[in-house]
Image (cartoon, coloured by chain):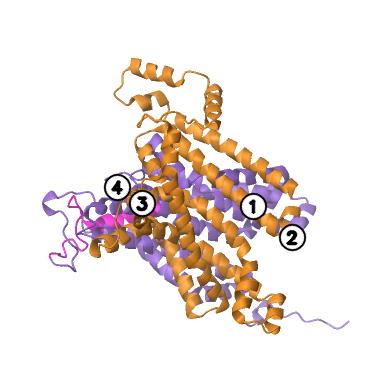
Amino acid sequence: MLIYTLKRLVVALLVALTISLISFGLLYLSGDPATTIAGESANQAAIEAIREQYGFNRPLYEQYFAWVGRALQGDFGTSFYFKVPVTDLIFERLPVTLGLGLSAIAFAIVLSIPLGVLAARYPNSIVDRLALTISVMGQAMPSFWFALLLIMVFSFMYPLLPSSGSETWVHFIMPTVVLGYYATPAIMRLTRTGMLEVLGADYIRTARAKGLRPRVVLFKHALRNAIIPVVSLSAVQLGFMLGGSIVVETIFALHGTGYLAWESIRRYDLPTVQAILLVFSLIYIVLTFLADLLNAWLDPRIRVG
Amino acid sequence: MAAITIPAAEDIVGPTPGQRLRKRIIGHRGVMIGAVILAIIVLMALLAPLLAPHDPYTQNLGNRIVPPVWTDGGSWVHPLGTDGLGRDYLSRLMYGAQISLFIGFATALISGVIGTVMGVAAGYFGGRVDLVVTFLITCRLSMPVILVSLAVVALVGSSLTVVVMVLGVLLWDRYAVVMRSATMQVRSLDYVAAASAAGCSTWRILVSEILPNVMNPLIVVATLEVAHAVLLEAALSFLGLGVQPPLPSWGLMISEGKDYLLFEAWLITIPGICLFALLLAINLLGDGVRDVTAPENRS
């Protein structure tokens, strides 16, 4: 287990290193970053001044190491637009995004696991059909369109929920539903397949033959074994939700990191964009690393093989 | 020695594999529904120049926000009404289908080539090649696609070509994952060993032994990736960093209709339904192809 953990840790660190290179490279995608910051109409002297101030005239590798070195100390530079440290900007907004992500994954789990279990328990029944319909529809529903439909119905036709802002928990209801719905199909399908497999196993027949109540067999014996891959999928989905939060937070004007990302991209606020890309990727790397460890801990075949 | 009579091919009764496949396809409800919807949208896109009642770019500010024909004030001149600049909505929808389909297929082609090469190489050669490819897949998955594509499109400049290139370069991960495991399964089979023993070159084994036998999963992934690309293009255009106005992308139309959400809801419901129908059709088709070609369903 220790060797497995170390191996995964090395991979995770290498991935983080690669992502940091890509984030750094973003700065040079537009060609000359100094011109991008100064704007189209700036004169040569102003561009030179910016180049000097941000150190764009130094060799690339030097700039990269300086950037990573500072990033490791939690300093991502100053936002071009807000003129405050990017780190403060992100950490001020991160709770909103993490709260949204966690409540969305909770929503997805609460909706999809019972449905998946019932669909596997009664294959080809009405519940199974319903579960299948929800998952097929969910995959085809563009989240931004779903969000607008919800706003139309629940904010305008029946003014029950606020359409924008992030002041109270009520503001999070619609964004949670939209973001959570997005993760539902994958979790439900995996729960259903896993349960179908487990329900055919010998130990389930034994449990039934012992005369245990069906509910105990279903939840205590079957679900416990089928849930292992679902847990790690949920961690991965939580990571994917960070990307989805950009769309959802923008529509609902939720002041989280996703909205900040979109605003910063539109304003060419590159230090903020670089930092968000790195932070989102790091969160995903940590989540998948934990999911891998959890899987290996629960299933010895993984850590040996 | 008793003569063994081998029945001639014509004497064998029963359906041929091709006929059985056809029967499975026609019997599969998802495939049929998906194929019909997709065919309608493809026809709509191809025949847009002939069928569209108006030019999709002609503005008429005196004729803004005409409602669809089934509501009060609608007329057959503009069956689906006009948008905020007085452009015919039906014509824009039809030309919008061209954009969605073009982006979907072009992206799936680019990412398909990248992902298949990586996946097949990793699955066939294993060892270090596999390590590198797996590492690249992990890196790619760690970055949120939408964030990276938004940033790149914003920095490079948004146009149809840029969107296709960016999505093409980003969406290869699922191809690589699926092709890698499919190739791993195939490469240990006897006919690959036989080809190798017969002295076939690596290239020949890859092209004529491995590739045809990983075709089924490849088609399934490609179908689902077309849907993925269509969805992402719509999201990027909706966020203002995809296809640029005045091009009639469905995502852009929803974004433009957003300002009229309160009173002219059809401006967002109509392009949304089109987008939903297209994604549903492609997904049904992809899932259906997987069911139909799966060996365990060949009874």
Query: Percent position (x, y) of residue A28?
Result: 46, 29
Q: Chain of mark 1?
A: A
Stretch of the chain drawn in magenta: B73-102
Judge by depth and name the residue closer to the eye, A151 or B57. Answer: A151
- The residue sitting at the front extreme is A168
Q: Residue at label 1?
A: A292
Q: Are marks 3 and 4 on the same chain?
A: yes
Position of the C terminus of chain A, as image quadrant, is bottom right
Which circle marks residue B247 in the picture?
Answer: 4
Is any atom of residue A262 visible in this view? yes
Is any atom of residue B104 visible in this view? no
Judge by depth and name the residue closer to the eye, B233 or A276. Answer: A276
Q: Does label 3 or label 4 sit earlier along the sequence?
A: 3
Which chain is orange in the rendering? A
Judge by depth and name the residue closer to the eye, A235 or A269. Answer: A235
Instruction: Determine crowd level at label 2: few under 14, some 14-19, many 20+ residues with C-alpha closer than 10 A.
Output: few
* Amino acid type at mark 4: Leu
Residue at the spot 43% in from the left edge and 35% down from the top edge: A88
